Image (spheres, rainbow, N blue to C red):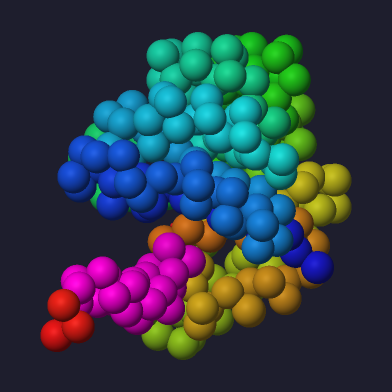
Amino acid sequence: MPLLGVNIDHVATLRQARRCDYPDPVSAALICEKAGADSIVAHLREDRRHINDNDVVRLRKELSIRFNLEMSLAPGIVDIACRLKPVQATLVPERRQEITTEGGLDVVAQARRLKASCARMQDKGTAISLFIDPEQEQIDKTLELGIGIIEFHTGAYALAPTKAARDRELKKLTAMTAYARKFGLEVNVGHGLHYQNTRAVALIKGIHELNIGHAIISYAIDTGLFQAVKDMLALARVNGV
Ligand code: PXP
């Protein structure tokens, strides 16, 4: 049965829309933990558009479940990770202009840079995962670097415009999971998974963990808004109007 990692970035997105101190992504992470999540993912971006330095320090301190720091290879961020020593770090490509992480890391092109940064973090006891597209050459290069964990970017599957295209992407994820498992890699998946498209991916044999963020935080609004209005009405109608 696959594990579930919850990405809490978008709780911080809502906080940053007002630059105030709520909603608190760390409180949200503790709710996820209480609900049975196996890990918490937070992406400390270079532009700090949602999660900030204080959040990751608090997550590291307050969580009992695994904290998976999502991060780029930017030297400043690698320095922070080396000080923070998260249980796990997932390395992703990052572009300032992008709305979200648009594709996997090019492990082939970045091998040398990856090797040096990963070694620094591994020395501090952090397990390294590489966020890659489900492609054989990326898996082969990951193996060559001696890294034991990968996460497949499921964006192409999630955004496939037709059923035929979706089935093709699912087939690719299934085949590449089997290939990676053959060499003992831990295989995780994430990006764009939601309440309608997750089941098929969860059924792929060999998947270790699903990392899901946007859909869960969105669903929390859908399911929690009714009570939020009720509670505010109870405060607002002080004169029994
Ligand atoms: N895993 C990784 C490596 C990601 O970059 C993201 C997006 O931040 C996710 C999982 C979660 O994606 P989503 O928010 O679309 O569920």
Establish if 114 lies above or below 75: below
Q: Is residue 219 visible?
A: yes
Q: Residue at x 33, y 27 (%)?
A: 46
Q: What kind of secondary structure does the magenta stretch mostly adopt?
A: helix
Quick check: is 162 in the magenta stretch? no
Quick check: is 221 in the magenta stretch? yes
Establish if 93 lies above or below 29: above
Establish if 128 lies above or below 122: below
Establish if 161 lies above or below 107: below
Q: How many marks?
A: 0
Q: Residue at x 63, y 79 (%)?
A: 200
- Residue 223's x, y, as percent? 43, 78
* Residue closer to the observer: 197 or 60: 60
- Which segment did they paint magenta? 215-238
- Residue 176's x, y, as percent? 68, 59
Q: Residue at x 45, y 38 (%)?
A: 43
Q: Residue at x 70, y 31 (%)?
A: 87
Residue 202 position by quadrant: bottom right
Q: Is residue 134 visible?
A: no
- Residue 40's x, y, as percent? 59, 47
Give the position of the N terminus as an image quadrant. Answer: bottom right
Give the position of the C terminus as an image quadrant. Answer: bottom left
- Residue 219's x, y, as percent? 43, 73
